[in-house]
Image (cartoon, helix red, strand yellow):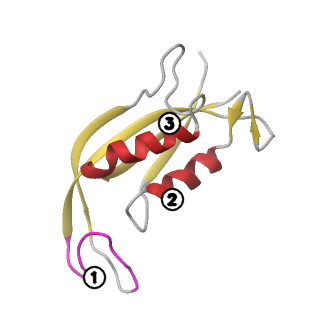
């Protein structure tokens, strides 16, 4: 079964809210490493952006540069094969839907990396 690393960026005040949501919805598939659950790596940084015309920013104003204290969050996701959801894993699209549902930003910045078993 495939494994992925999901990396996303969020305002620091939202980090634990998002992680708790993902861990609760996918307890056996997100942040699970062997006999450990709720695993994540969180590192602080500063995100920057300029909301463009048509944006509805949660932080900042259209046309004005913004800098936000954010966390970079990394979690392991155990993926499924061809089925939408199975005991063996979960589809990455389902995890991303839940991330976007709970994340405060209109546009969520994230990366997905497929991991190799070596």
Q: Considering the whole magenta stretch, tell me its main secondary structure.
A: loop
Q: How crowded is mark 1: few (under 14 residues within 10 Å), some or many (20 or more)?
A: some
Nearer-N-terminus badge (2/3): 3
Check disc 2 and report its element: helix, strand or loop: helix
Residue farthest front in this picture:
24
76 over 17 or under it: above or below: above
Q: Residue at x 52, y 13 (%)?
A: 35
Residue 63: x, y in percent?
25, 82
Quarter in which the C terminus is drawn: top right
Q: Mark 2 points at which residue?
A: 101
The answer to whether residue 112 is left or right of residue 69 is right
Q: In the rendered structure, find residue 52 and report the number of the disc placed on it.
A: none
Residue 24: x, y in percent?
52, 38
Check disc 3 and report its element: helix, strand or loop: helix
Is residue 115 highlighted in magenta?
Answer: no
Tag 2 near tag 1, CB within 8 Å = no
Tag 2 near tag 3, CB within 8 Å = no
Q: Name the residue under label 1.
A: 62
Tag 1 near tag 3, CB within 8 Å = no
Nearer-N-terminus badge (2/1): 1
93 over 32 or under it: above or below: below
Nearer-N-terminus badge (1/3): 3
Q: Name the residue under label 3.
A: 23
Region of the chain picked out in magenta, as a range? 54-65
Q: In which quarter of the image is residue 1?
A: top right
Name the one closer to the observer, 18 or 107. Answer: 18
Residue 96: x, y in percent?
56, 51
Q: How far apart are marks 1 and 3 (CA)?
A: 33 Å
Q: Distance between the residues labelled 2 and 1?
A: 22 Å
Residue farthest right in this picture:
83
58 over 78 or under it: above or below: below
């Amino acid at each position: 079964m495939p494994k992925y690393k999901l990396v996303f960026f969020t305002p620091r005040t939202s980090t634990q809210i998002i992680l708790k949501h993902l861990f609760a919805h996918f307890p056996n598939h997100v942040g699970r490493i062997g006999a450990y659950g709720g695993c994540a790596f969180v590192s602080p940084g500063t995100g920057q952006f300029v909301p463009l015309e048509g944006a509805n920013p949660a932080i900042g104003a259209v046309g004005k540069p913004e800098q936000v204290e954010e966390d970079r969050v990394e979690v392991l996701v155990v993926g499924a094969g061809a089925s939408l959801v199975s005991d063996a894993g979960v589809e990455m699209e389902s995890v991303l839907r839940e991330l976007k549902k709970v994340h405060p930003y209109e546009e969520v910045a994230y990366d997905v990396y497929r991991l190799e078993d070596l």
